[in-house]
Amino acid sequence: MKLHRFLAGTLAMAIVLASCPEASAAEPIKTHVPSRPAGATDMVAFAAPAIDTVRVGFIGLGMRGPGAVERFTHIPGTKIMALCDIEKDRAEKCQDILTRQGLPKATVYGGKEDSWKALCDRDDIDLVYIATDWVHHAPMAKYAMEKGKHVAIEVPAAMSLDEIWDLIDTSERTRRHCMMLENCVYDSFELNTLNMAQQGLFGEVLHTEGAYIHNLEEFWPYYWNNWRMDFNQKHKGDIYATHGTGPACQLLDMHRGDRMTTLVAMDTKAVNGPAYIEKTTGKKPETFANGDHTMTIIKTANGKTMQIQHDVMTPRPYNRMYQLTGTKGFANKYPTEGYSFAPEQIAKDAVPDHENLNAHGFITDEQRKALTERYTHPIIKEVGEVAKKVGGHGGMDYIMDYRLVYCLRNGLPLDMDVYDMAEWCCLGPLGAISIDNGSAPVEVPDFTRGAWQKVKGYRHAYKK
């Protein structure tokens, strides 16, 4: 009798699942891939004509912009032409940076909501560098590309799927670079580990992890017009995924032989965000969309996985996670940097006493030092010491800007293209769809529209 009731219940459940597609986890929620505009082609491995002197205009000179202006004064082959901020005095103040370096003053724009358009309209600017609040990133970048400029956009470059596709279409149609300014891919540990992975030290890379875990409570008051907290209040999903996603995607060769296919996201309830608003305004918000902690899990076409986390609300120590799991080794950056390998994986001349290696713990500090010295990334060898002196998050900001200029001056593909921008930004809007549907799997669009296998393996470009 009990068996009969069990079989009957199982049959009933099967009927429910068959008649209710939403109840099945087999098929992800579909996403739309718009047709490529007529006459446009993909930007995979795209290289624009070389520019001898890169003439730059900066838009947004609040928290991040002035540091970028300072860094560009140390990069050979650049000329700062224009400075713009809605609060014009900020742009005027940046003239002091140029004066200290013995450089000519730039033209200043500002004071109005659309002052930045006059900067983009100029004929003597090659690159527009955008460091404004998030909601202005995509519209400014699109306008600049339409005016014939390459663009570099602070993270995240796009906040919705419509903005992502708009930037892709504009870049493909205008044949202008659209690079997102993701600095964390230039951290020395990330670059050296990427070099090791590309040399095969970890075997086949199967899984990567990344995060942006950074309690921003002390920073909230410094965001102009409260724009960052406002965005958290209105949107869910991983709205700031790129610091963790960028390094993870480079390790897995995204759209260079592999691509994201599906993601699942879930979040905690919102506690600290609403509490902060109530504490600072005296009024409890009626709604607050973004949970205190968000997790996204991604599957790739080649059977790899990623896990990305976002948490700017809780008092956790700063953590970008950065983990790599391969068939022959493991790498970890936070909270402790370390490598672990299968004993037979490392040659004697790479790591001392390699016979003592095992997969139950990290290699010793001495072994890690020897390994790092052997596999120091060429970019670190070239500009690592200069980067430390110039600064910017320990030097990775300088390397990011240096590499952008280096590639433009030498007519090379950029280290990060418009599809990197799309893939690293899509976790926000796609994650929101997943969360709104009970953490259902969601299809990740092929942002390259079929060109993701055109290049095999992620590599930085160098002049010959």
Image (cartoon, helix red, strand yellow):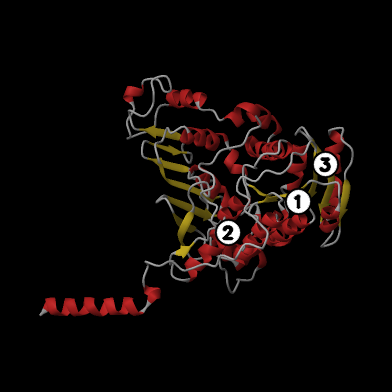
Secondary element type, mark 1: loop
Percent position of residue 255, x then y: 53, 50
Q: Which mark sits nearer the N-terminus, 2 or 1?
A: 1
Amino acid bearing label 3: Ile
- Residue at screen point 36% across, 20% down: 353
- Quadrant in the picture for the N terminus: bottom left
Mark 2 Cα shell of 10 Å, populated few (<14), some (14-19), many (≥20): many
Residue 296 shows up from this direction: no
Tag of residue 62: 1
* Amino acid at pointer 1: Gly
- Residue closest to the eye, 307 or 313: 307
Question: Which-is-in-front pick, marks 2 and 3?
Answer: 3
**Pointer 3 residue:** 80
Query: At numbered mark 3, what does the secondary structure look like: helix, strand or loop?
Result: strand
From the top left corner, tell me how far across and down residue 121 is, in percent: 85, 55
Quarter of the image with the C terminus is top right
**Above or below — where is 73 with respect to 240?**
above
Establish if 307 lies above or below 5: above
Mark 2 / mark 3, whichever is N-terminal: 3
For the residues marked 2 and 1, what is the alpha-carbon distance in whole angstroms?
21 Å
**Percent x, y of residue 196:** 47, 32
Hey, what amino acid is under mark 2? Ile
Disc 2: which residue: 239
Would residue 105 be found to the left or right of residue 432 on screen?
A: right
* Image spot of residue 246 (x, y percent): 55, 47
The label nearer to you, 3 versus 1, is 3
Q: Which residue is drawn at 48% across and 55% down?
A: 260
Badge 3: how crowded within 10 Å, few (<14), some, or many (20+)? Answer: many
Tags 2 and 1 touching, CB below 8 Å = no
